[in-house]
Amino acid sequence: MDLYLGIDGGGTGCRAAVADASGRILGRGAAGPANIASDVLGARDNILAAANKALADADCPPDAIARLAAGLGLAGANAAGAAQALRRALPFTRLRIETDGHAAVRGALGGHDGIVAAIGTGSVLARQSGGVIRQIGGWGLVLGDQGSGAWLGRGLLAEVLAGLDGFRPMTPLLQQVAAQYGGKEGIIAFSLSARPADFAALAPRILDSADPVAQLLLARATDDVAAAISVLQGDRPLPVTFIGGLGPAHAERLAGRWPIRPSQGTALDGALMLAREAA
């Protein structure tokens, strides 16, 4: 029996599904983060852990992993050398690796034209037109990820430091976060080892707050997402599909700017599509 493995791996976690030739999902699994730009070995381990859990859920023997055709939609797949390094470390018989944004577009739009704003721990946006995908963003927290959970969390900590340095009033939210981390020294120590998912853990504090600093950060995030969508719209406006943990929040804030279309499927569905195209 032909088996297909889809992997949706991002900065927060990794999801897997095993399907048969008809597309019926036989088993699912999950594991930790799978950003291959920041930690290719850790991503490999989590991909394999999620795949083995999905195989077990499908009542398949462990050695079936070597016979899988796999489609992987992974954060960091656009970093030079990352996909090649991962490919050498995986046992699958056929394999296609794309960015998590590419898989998200395939799953969300299927064969339809449109724009996808995938905003979770990180952010990536893409336009699909005539079967061609154009992706922008997805550069990671150091260089981009505007509007994402990690971007918001990092921004909040930067605002706390600015407040402690006297550049802005210490609002209640800034005071709470400063106390939580033990002041400047604690924030600096946290930042030296924090990964995007660690920064993103602060995003709910911003989304749920009426604090003026939270509202300022949200306004900046909305402006950045709107600017990216505008770039992708071009001369022929298309409906926008918002996905990811922060997708609904941005959709609400941008309602009325463009037609908004619900997602047809998930990034995991898109990864299973990639598995069928694996060489």
Image (cartoon, helix red, strand yellow):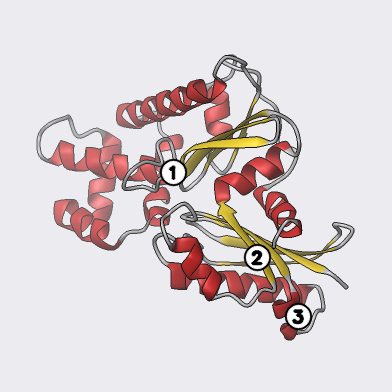
Q: Secondary structure at mark 3?
A: helix
Q: Secondary structure at mark 2?
A: strand
Label 1 Cα neighbours within 10 Å, binned few <14 / some 14-19 / many ≥20:
many
Q: Residue at x 41, y 27 (%)?
A: 224
Label 3 Cα neighbours within 10 Å, binned few <14 / some 14-19 / many ≥20:
few
The answer to the question of whether label 3 and label 1 lie on touching residues, with beta carbons closer than 8 A, is no
Image position, residue 25 (x, y; %): 82, 61
Which amino acid type is shown beneath numbered disc 2? Leu
Q: Which residue is mark 2?
A: 95
Q: Quote the CA–CA distance across marks 3 and 1.
A: 36 Å
- The quarter of the picture where the N terminus appears is bottom right
Which residue reaches farthest front? 279
Q: Point out which mark residue 149 bears.
A: 1
Q: Earlier in the sequence, mark 3 or mark 1?
A: 3
Q: Which residue is mark 3?
A: 64
213 vs 38: above or below: above
The answer to the question of whether label 2 and label 3 lie on touching residues, with beta carbons closer than 8 A, is no
Image position, residue 53 (x, y; %): 69, 74
Q: Earlier in the sequence, mark 2 or mark 3?
A: 3
Q: Earlier in the sequence, mark 2 or mark 1?
A: 2
